[in-house]
Image: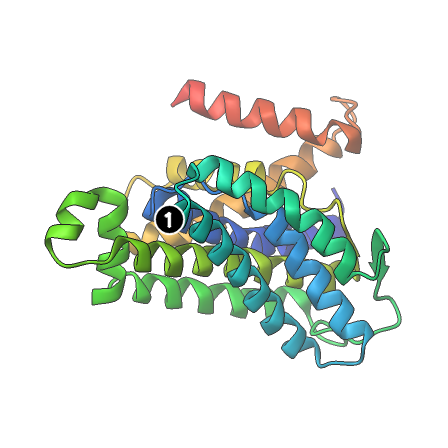
């Protein structure tokens, strides 16, 4: 594996680490099986790309990506809370509908290319930028979850009855929590599109698997389950996952190709869960 391939793996590890934090919020903190993330990732990517193509600031494009993802999370929460649709099904429905919405955002094109457009990485060290962004998000989320609001958010995932008895609004916290979760995922999607300089309507496929793999790997590496460490482990697990995939794909002895990515990921997750 060359130096450029190593740096690319680190970059992608940091981007997907942010996405893993978003998935961690819904699956671990809220205990909500949210499958909206595949659609939210592409929504963030599409929103960021089309705004840049229209001449908007790359930073504004990223922020709008986050906002769009937050709205997707609100819809999932609304379907679950208002119409009592199962959390799993509500996420699938929103992700399913987002496919058409993402295509419409992208002007009916399955992909957009940003090679001739300025991004937040233009003329800068991408690893440096992504490291700053990742550290900032880790600190922000970890701090947020230790505030009174964060304790309320965590309580509904641990014991809803106790949360209600303490005056915490389950619907309100679920709406905010899923909005925050999908906002982070879409934020990662926006970063991905600007980093790779393209957006594809099918790029979100497997986002949930990659995110869960990152969370599981991180949890197995860190025995300390404090809140700060748990958030950090999402990013660390994502980086390890990307490095493992890159090493496997570039190993002549294994003879693997890029088309084997899903097989490698599945075997990796299965092995970790069996061994643990």
- Which quarter shows the N terminus? top right
Q: Looking at the image, which residue sits at the far right?
A: 116
**Number of numbered callouts drawn:** 1
Could you say which quadrant of the image residue 61 lies in? bottom right
What's the coloring here? rainbow
Q: Residue at image x 55%, y 65%? A: 131
Please name the residue that numbered disc 1 is placed on: 81
Q: Looking at the image, which residue sits at the far left?
A: 165
Q: Residue at image x 77%, y 74%? A: 52
Regarding mark 1 in the picture, which secondary structure is present there?
helix
- Which quarter shows the C terminus? top left
Q: Is residue 228 left or right of residue 131?
A: left
Depth order, front residue of 120/252: 120
Is 169 placed above or below 254 here? below
Residue 246 lies, in percent from the top left, at: 69, 39
Residue 181 lies, in percent from the top left, at: 46, 55
Q: Residue at image x 38%, y 61%? A: 176
Few, some or many residues within 10 Å of mark 1 (<14, 14–19, 20+): some
Q: Residue at image x 62%, y 53%? A: 41
Depth order, front residue of 146/276: 146
Q: Looking at the image, which residue sits at the far top?
A: 274
Depth order, front residue of 157/113: 157
Residue 144 lies, in percent from the top left, at: 32, 66
Depth order, front residue of 238/73: 73
Q: Is residue 222 left or right of residue 213?
A: left
Residue 48 lies, in percent from the top left, at: 70, 67
Q: Is residue 77 left or right of residue 126?
A: left
């Amino acid at each position: 594996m060359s130096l450029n391939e190593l740096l690319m793996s680190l970059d992608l590890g940091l981007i997907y680490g942010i996405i893993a934090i978003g998935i961690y919020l819904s699956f671990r903190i809220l205990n909500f099986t949210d499958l909206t993330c595949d659609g939210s990732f592409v929504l963030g990517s599409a929103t960021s790309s089309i705004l840049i193509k229209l001449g908007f600031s790359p930073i504004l494009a990223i922020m709008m990506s986050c906002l769009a993802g937050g709205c997707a999370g609100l819809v999932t929460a609304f379907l679950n809370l208002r119409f009592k649709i199962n959390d799993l099904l509500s996420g699938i429905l929103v992700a399913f509908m987002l496919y058409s919405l993402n295509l419409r955002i992208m002007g009916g094109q399955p992909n957009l290319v940003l090679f001739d457009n300025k991004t937040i990485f233009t003329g800068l060290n991408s690893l440096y930028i992504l490291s700053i962004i990742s550290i900032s998000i880790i600190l922000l989320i970890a701090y947020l979850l230790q505030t009174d609001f964060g304790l309320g958010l965590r309580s509904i995932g641990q014991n809803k009855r106790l949360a209600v008895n303490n005056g915490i609004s389950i619907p309100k916290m679920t709406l905010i929590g899923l909005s925050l979760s999908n906002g982070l995922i879409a934020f990662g999607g926006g970063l991905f599109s600007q980093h790779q300089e393209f957006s594809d309507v099918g790029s979100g496929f497997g986002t949930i698997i990659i995110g869960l793999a990152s969370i599981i790997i991180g949890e197995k590496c860190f025995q300390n389950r404090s809140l700060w460490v748990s958030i950090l482990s999402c990013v660390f697990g994502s980086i390890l996952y990307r490095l493992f995939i890159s090493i496997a794909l570039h190993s002549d002895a294994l003879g693997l190709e890029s088309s084997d990515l899903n097989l490698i990921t599945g075997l990796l997750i299965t092995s970790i869960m069996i061994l643990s």
